[in-house]
Amino acid sequence: MSFDDLISYENIYIAFKRLQTTSRDYYKNLYWNDLYNFGLDLEKNINTLIHLLKEDLYKPNKSYKIYFPKSTGLVRPISVLNFIDLLVYQAIVNLLAEKFYKSFHSYYNHFVFGNIYNKTNNENKIFFYKHWKQQWKKYENLTKQHYNDGYEYITEFDLASFYDTVDHYLVKNLLKEKNIDKKIIDILSSQLLSWNKNQTQNQGFKHGIPQGPLGSGFIAEICLHNIDKKMRKLVLENRNIRYMRYVDDIRIFTKDKYLAQKNIVYLDLLARELGFIPQANKTKVKKVDNIHLYIKTNKDFSRVASEYKEKGELSPSNNRKYTKRLIKNLKSGNYDKTLIKFGLFKVKGNEELKNLLIDKYKDLYPYIEAVCFYLSKYFINDKKVIEWVNNLIYKKKIIYKYIIAVFFEFFYEIIKFDYKIIDKYYYNSEDWYISYFLLDWIYHNEPDWLNNLNQNKNLIVERKRISLQYNNINQTSIKNSKLTKMIKSENNLIALNGLRLYYDECINSCFNSEVSIDIKVSNNTFIKNIAEDKTGFPVSYILDFLKKYDIKNGEEYFRLSYFSEDELNRLKYDLKESEKYKEVEPIIWLIKIDLFNHLIVKKTLEICGEEVKQPKKYGNILNMNFFVNKFPISYKNFSEIHELRNKVAHPFKDDGSINNESLKINYRTLKRLERLEIKSLKEIINSFKYVSDLSNELVFSKE
């Protein structure tokens, strides 16, 4: 496993796709803009990052912490990483997953069920782990099987603050044992040290891996594998014990209590050898009488979730059912976290449920995001909700600052505006997560007040502040100045964000924007690389694109004697835009490639001497008889692309309902459409030969 493997284009590209395809949650929302910006010029940005790594110019940044409230009254720290750090981290973990797979795979679905590496070479490679729901189902099914085989005593063993206690030396030694390249280990070590610095004293700690990032789960698996090995050996030697692990939750199955207690002691010693601390209040032996009650089977959740995904809402009967279950559970005081998190994101508004959530909010801090989502969706203008929200912000003493941040996230429209709130939270670095959503509150109520805010020390907050300030500017000259300042920033993510805002100006104004900047003035490493257009004439860019897909006859097809410079410029423009947005905005790729295809069809018909009839308003020329007969593959594929473009670009469906088709242009669909596009271009372009004779004419010949 060499350093060259780490900095290969394919590895970093897969790392990017794996970050892109993780489920959208609070964590991904924080880095989504940076991922989007990086993906706009993905090939060049990856090559720039490769250069930084190769020349030892990459240095990790410190992380920012969010502290989630736990039902115990304590907090769970989440580490929010700089996006480029996150990308390098995932690229490293990609290699580790490949290296450790041989050691791990025999444990999968027999002893280990969580964070299962998705070992594949097909398009599913963009998903790093096997789907957690499938794995959890297997975990529960084997639990039932062991119970049915007579293992009635189940020991639950949990580790206290597991991620925070992972020793960096342990990680380094485990990687050295696998002969991981020293440079890779050094980069990972420097990352872990940077991310575990004290937020106020800048003091580094030699323990802890970041909670939140996708790759940390696999680092955890590496550290826990020694426990798995020892426990598997014990199982194979003693048929009276069974062992299973899902992440850091361990279950031991025995046929008597003595053996269960004996293995608790053994597990305790194994964990402490690795520097982990067992969680005493969660380690217990249970004699299970009813396995279904023990695992709290919720099979109907999966079925109802599928219904919700398909229809966008629950059926009336399921809505009533889950609303009643939520109300009953909240009244009982024995809170079912799965039901609460599942139900509040899916059921419709209900007065009794609303009142219960407000009355019991102090008990519901661990689920406050679901509570606020529900109340903001159905009761944003409700008098009781408005009064409750403002009392909490202005009058109540709230222990967890995370709660205040979530209130500004969901209720920024109804929290009354007071400048004192800005002074209280915005400039305190420990309150950065509040500041992040506080900006939405300011922008909604007093957008001009954004100009009074000074630079924020937190990069994530600062990027958002600059973007909202820019959105509030109307004067072109000021916009130009602001954009130029952004792209000149030494901070790569702010510079890329400025470039994205410039691209947005071009898109939103149909590419006739008055906003105009010269990105070549920037000395930022990423922007400089993007600004270098080495393709020269427009035809050069097009030919380079075609050669990547083994379309060799481009020189014969694209000639200035047959294409005007304006036509070539437009083809290059549409092709570049489609490539730019392909990885982050498939709908724009589809629209631009459809325009490109129409220009190709029109020009092909003209070159072949066919009359091109003016299409009707909003019509197309893909159904020309000549094209159908001579280029059947292109006709079929271009038509499919055009039809899908019409579906996703139109706001309404045929039945008058809102069109959500754009959601269906996922990675697999995009790759399939790309293959159709390349096949079509090959059929057209490779079918032409340029004949240098006296007439110097272009002739069609099927090869």
Image (cartoon, grey):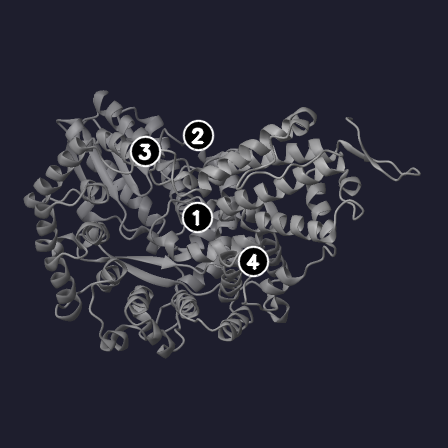
Q: In this view, does 523 lie to the left or right of 666?
A: right
Q: Quick check: marks 1 and 2 in contact, CB under 8 Å? A: no
Q: Nearer the viewer, mark 1 or mark 4?
A: 4
Mark-to-mark CA distance, 3 and 2: 36 Å
Q: In this view, does 684 lie to the left or right of 492?
A: right
Q: Nearer the viewer, mark 3 or mark 1?
A: 3
**What residue would you read off at disc 1?**
215
Callout 1 secondary element: loop
Q: Which residue is drawn at 62% across and 47% down?
A: 575
- N-term mark: 4 or 3: 3
Q: Which residue lies furthest to the top in this view?
A: 149
Q: Residue 633: x percent and y percent? A: 64, 27
Q: How crowded is mark 2: few (under 14 residues within 10 Å), some or many (20 or more)?
A: few
The vertical placement of 487 against 6, above or below, is below
- Using the rendered view, name the quadrant where residue 416 is placed: bottom left
Residue toward you, 667 or 256: 667
Q: Nearer the viewer, mark 2 or mark 4?
A: 4
Can the viewer see residue 221?
Answer: yes
**What residue would you read off at disc 2?**
106
Q: Which mark is residue 511?
A: 4
Q: Residues within 10 Å of mark 3 (few under 14, many from 20)?
A: few
Q: Which residue is drawn at 33% across and 44% down?
A: 270
